[in-house]
Image: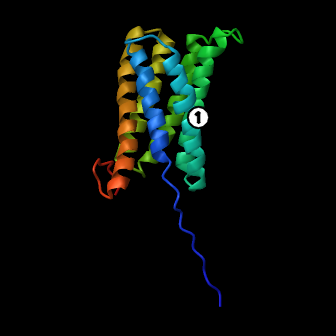
Amino acid sequence: MNQEIRLHDQTANPAPLGLLGFGMTTVLLNIHNAGLFPINSMILAMGIFYGGIAQIIAGIMEWKKNNTFGTTAFTSYGLFWLTFVALLVMPEVGWVGASSSIAMGCYLFMWGLFTFGLFIGTLRISRALQVVFASLTALFWLLALGNFTGSAGILVFAGYVGIFCGSSAIYTGLAQVLNELYGKTLLPIGPVK
């Protein structure tokens, strides 16, 4: 007699960790982009540890849950934050010269293109993630345009888009935590039907 053994995954949902690491770091960086304070160690530390390392950990945990989208998104954006901090710090310590505005525009444009591809994937997940990824696509492309043109106004506007984007990720992450804890929908995320 063959008995089928079924394993039930009882591990925690890593998405809130990734969403909160992304969201909080994005809000703080974009408060800077909006012109409210200069780039500083707080933003760099958030970029390395919460935006960077925490998202990579969340991505690895998503891999364990067999979630290709989550693995790709969280690991990639965790590495985005680490590369972004490196782009700022390496010239300061004399390792390499600073990137030109054209080079930064290309960097940001490619991240926008990648994000747009993931946005297409969110059309099968939830309304909340659609908002996060649509606004993130707009943010990357606005930052790219601001770098390509040298327009301070576009970069400030992008900062406000980034504050919205990061806030939507914070909302989505907290909604997942609270909805799970209470066993009901306290904060809707709009699953795709």
**Residue 93 placement: quadrant:** top right
Q: Quadrant of residue 79?
A: top right
The C terminus, quarter of image: bottom left
Q: Position of residue 37 (x, y in %)?
A: 41, 11
Q: State whether residue 95 is above or below residue 135.
A: above
Q: Quadrant of the N terminus?
A: bottom right
Q: Nearer the viewer, residue 160 or 93?
A: 93
Q: Nearer the viewer, residue 55 or 153?
A: 55
Q: Look at label 1 and name its amino acid.
A: Ile
Give x and y (percent) for residue 64: 60, 54
| Residue shown at 37% from the left, 12% from the top | 36
x, y percent for residue 165 = 38, 31
In the displayed image of the protein, which residue is found farthest to the bottom? 1
Give the residue number, with chain letter if any, for mark 1.
53
Inspect this view and state whether residue 191 appears. no
Compared to residue 120, the image places residue 157 above or below, namely above
Q: Pointer 1: residues within 10 angstroms few (<14), some, or many (20+)?
A: many
Q: Residue at the location (35% across, 39% down)?
A: 171
Question: What residue do we see at 60% from left, 77% from top?
Answer: 5
94 shown above or below 184:
above
